[in-house]
Amino acid sequence: MSSMRKARCWSNRVPSILLPARRGEGGAQRRMRGGANLSRPPMRTRDLPTTARAQELRSVPTEAERKLWHRLRDRRLNGAKFVRQAPVGPYFADFAYRESTLIVELDGSQHAESPHDEKRDAFLISQGYSVLRFWNGDVMRAIDNVCETILAALEGKLEPFERFKTPMASVGAAPHPALRATFSPLCGEKGCTQEGPTS
């Protein structure tokens, strides 16, 4: 009994790297520590405040975000893996497809001609992302057109325009046909005409 105590006490004082690995405690992997597997890329570390904020944003989506996420999740849109509230620098992208560096943003009426959004888009574009923006009303009324437009952007068939900015494109081209009848945030449930909201 006392020899067990001595052994335990002795093992507590000796650094674990010097002790032989016991069965079931990692075996060969444990013995390889210290540089034997240098070809592995370094682990990605988590920024806990950023991760917590992203989780918080994912837990309270808007109705439009919830509806679009239902169409994008689980690789439902042509096999593309989208993530929600992805941290990109100091910002959080509503939806991001990292493989083709596409960010999809949903905007409410408070985003109409927002200088903050222009600054944010400039940063995202400088990081190599293309930014595609939709109004919440577009998603709520014409989700199929929104998904068709996202798919066109993924396939490289969408020309840049004022709501779709890319790192190497000029703004001002015609929008995708699915967005030609896009809804303005100023239009209510009654619809819009060329002049503005109808009464």
Image (cartoon, rainbow, N blue to C red):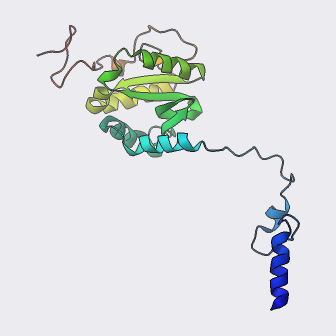
Q: Nearer the viewer, residue 8 or 68?
A: 8
- Give the residue at x 32% y 32%: 143
- Give the quarter of the figure containing the N terminus: bottom right
Q: Can you see residue 191?
A: yes
Residue in the image at 78% along x and 75% along y: 23
Give above or below for 197 relative to 89: above
Hey, which residue is sitting farthest bottom in the picture? 1
Residue 107 appears at what percent x and percent y?
A: 36, 26
Can I make out residue 21 in this image?
Answer: no
User: Which corner quadrant holds the C terminus?
Assistant: top left
Is 36 left, or right, of 96 in this rendering? Answer: right
Name the quadrant containing residue 179.
top left
In the image, what residue occupies the spot 82% across and 77% down? Answer: 9
Q: Nearest the camera: 70 or 23?
A: 23
- In the image, is 31 to the left or to the right of 119? right
Tell me what residue is drawn at x 75 percent, y 43 percent. 41
